[in-house]
Image (tube, helix red, strand yellow):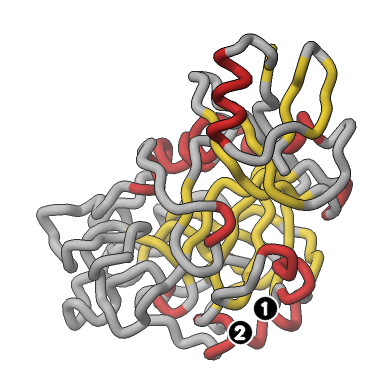
Amino acid sequence: MSHVVVDQEEVPYVKTKAKLEDAILQGRIKQAARSCKELNASVHADGLYYLNSSRGVLYQTFCDMTTAGGGWTLVASVHENNMYGKCTLGDRWSNQQGSDPNRPDGEGTWANTVTFGTAESSTSDDYKNPGYYDIAAQDVSVWHVPNNIDLEQWSATSILRYHTENHFLNLYGGNLFYLFKKFPVRFGLGACITDNGPAIPIVYDTGNVDYNKNLYEISTPGFIAFRVFNTERAAMALCSGVKPTGCHIEHFCIGGGGHFPEAIPRQCGDFTRWSASKEITEAAVLLFYR
């Protein structure tokens, strides 16, 4: 079910994008919500809803109306389709054309407006919607959900869930698109530790500090860290649940630029050279805004 504003009153409405677009053309819909946070005042059920970008692009996504008061908009998922593929087809959050120093940004997905996938398939494939770059947000929420799980079971089956609550995105343009404009995920742009981006404290919803500590070494649990570099100056986008204290970030961070020099292409890919458990490597990483 999608949710829109009809004749200035918020009501559940049409189930398909085609019918929604027809209603807009007929003038029956005055405004569609920009985010799940806007819907949260009158809608309290988790599920799929239609939102409208600032440029009038309609899209369907998942709203988490439960966690920490609700109002969380799913904007992206990072799904590893092949741990043995190193920057191959499907590595949209790093480089689909191999490890290449001539493409230091790789696909550039973390800081561009390219969209792909569907919300419903977020645990089976990569996903990115217009909300990723369009929504003005203050905080993020992250879910690690086992691959190929139906959306009705995402929350219950998550192996790790957490959110920020210090409104850190206010300092970085209001969403991850602008954060990564400030901290580009680009090979060779910086050095390990010295040039890493921000590390933000988190509040656990599923899992805890001990769980994160057991998953990853050379890191401090209880944070989400952005744009980090390894020893060879390869850039990675996001370290989930931890702040790196060493340089071998390829073992536990996700997404990246276009080139990973060590033992090319061993470390290249959305989940790079992960050393974590099968449980965590076979789970999609879902990103939410509020």
Q: Nearer the viewer, residue 75 or 210?
A: 75
Residue 170 visible in the picture: no
Q: Quarter of the image for the C terminus: give it.
A: top right
Seen at 14% across and 62% down, the residue is 100
Q: Residue furthest left?
A: 102
In the rendered structure, the answer to whether residue 167 lies left or right of residue 75 reads right
Do the residues bearing badges 2 and 1 touch, measured as CB atoms within 8 Å?
yes
Residue 171 lies, with reference to residue 204, above or below; the image says above
Q: Amino acid at mark 2?
A: Leu
Residue 215 - label: 2
Residue 212 - label: 1
Residue 74 lies, with reference to residue 267, above or below; the image says above
Quarter of the rendering containing residue 135: top right
Quarter of the rendering containing residue 51: top right
Query: What is the x, y in percent for residue 153?
Result: 73, 70
In the rendered structure, the answer to whether residue 213 lies left or right of residue 198 reads right
Label 1 environment density (alpha carbons within 10 Å; few <14, some 14–19, many ≥20): some
| Element carrying mark 1 | helix
Residue 58 visible in the picture: yes
Q: Nearer the viewer, residue 81 or 267?
A: 81
